[in-house]
Image (tube, rainbow, N blue to C red):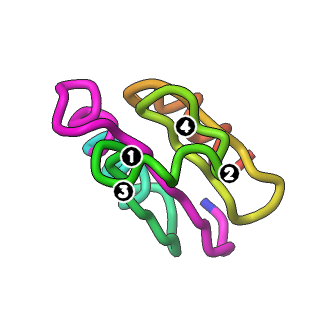
């Protein structure tokens, strides 16, 4: 879509079906639509301290921190149109 390098963090809670779908949907979108990106998966069960600084209150949450401005999307990332609008504006 764009030549920018995207910075993304996906916050999940364990291996729940919703978290697994969010990871799969996010990875599939990034692989098919983005030329250059960094995707970090953070399990809040393992790293609960990461939620507050990122303003994460529900899971799964995808945070696009690069390019600025920071954007958040909640859910299992199955809506590709919402995902595209969050990531590439």
Of callouts 1 and 4, which one flags the residue occurring earlier in the amino acid sequence? 1
Picture coordinates of residue 16, whole percent (x, y): 19, 28
- Residue 34 lies left or right of residue 43; in this view the side is right
Of callouts 1 and 2, which one flags the residue occurring earlier in the amino acid sequence? 1
Question: Considering the numbered disc 1 on the image, is that residue within a helix, a strand or a loop?
Answer: helix
Q: CA distance from mark 2 to mark 4?
A: 8 Å
Residue 89 colored in magenta in the image: no
Query: In the image shown, does 43 or 32 lie closer to the viewer?
Result: 43
At horizontal 43% and vertical 30% (from top left) the residue drawn is: 59
Q: Tell me, yes or no, whether the two marked residues, 2 and 4, touch with CB atoms within 8 Å.
A: no
Mark 1 vs mark 2: give the one in front.
1
Q: CA distance from mark 2 to mark 3?
A: 19 Å
At horizontal 52% and vertical 75% (from top left) the residue drawn is: 36
Picture coordinates of residue 13, whole percent (x, y): 31, 36
- Residue 56 lies left or right of residue 11; in this view the side is right
What mark, if any, has residue 41 been given in the picture?
3
Query: In the image shown, does 56 or 46 lie closer to the viewer?
Result: 46
Q: Name the residue carrying label 1.
A: 26
Mark 2 vs mark 3: give the one in front.
3
Q: Tell me, yes or no, whether the two marked residues, 3 and 1, touch with CB atoms within 8 Å.
A: no
| Residue at far right of view | 69
Picture coordinates of residue 21, whole percent (x, y): 25, 33
Q: CA distance from mark 1 to mark 4?
A: 8 Å
User: Which class describes the residues within 10 Å of circle 1: few (<14), some (14-19), or many (20+)?
Assistant: many
User: Which class describes the residues within 10 Å of circle 3: few (<14), some (14-19), or many (20+)?
Assistant: few
What mark, if any, has residue 82 been given in the picture?
none
Rendered-image quadrant of the C terminus: top right
Q: Name the residue carrying label 4.
A: 83
Mark 3 vs mark 1: give the one in front.
3
Residues drawn in magenta: 2-23
User: Which class describes the residues within 10 Å of circle 4: few (<14), some (14-19), or many (20+)?
Assistant: many
Q: Tell me, yes or no, whether the two marked residues, 1 and 4, touch with CB atoms within 8 Å.
A: yes
């Amino acid at each position: 879509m764009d030549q920018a390098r995207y910075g993304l963090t996906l916050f999940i809670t364990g291996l729940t079906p919703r978290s697994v779908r969010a990871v799969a949907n996010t990875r599939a979108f990034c692989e098919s639509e983005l030329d250059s990106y960094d995707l970090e998966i953070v399990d809040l069960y393992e790293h609960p301290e990461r939620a507050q600084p990122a303003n994460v209150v529900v899971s799964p949450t995808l945070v696009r921190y690069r390019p600025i401005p920071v954007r958040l999307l909640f859910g299992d990332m199955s809506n590709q149109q919402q995902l595209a609008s969050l990531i590439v504006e």
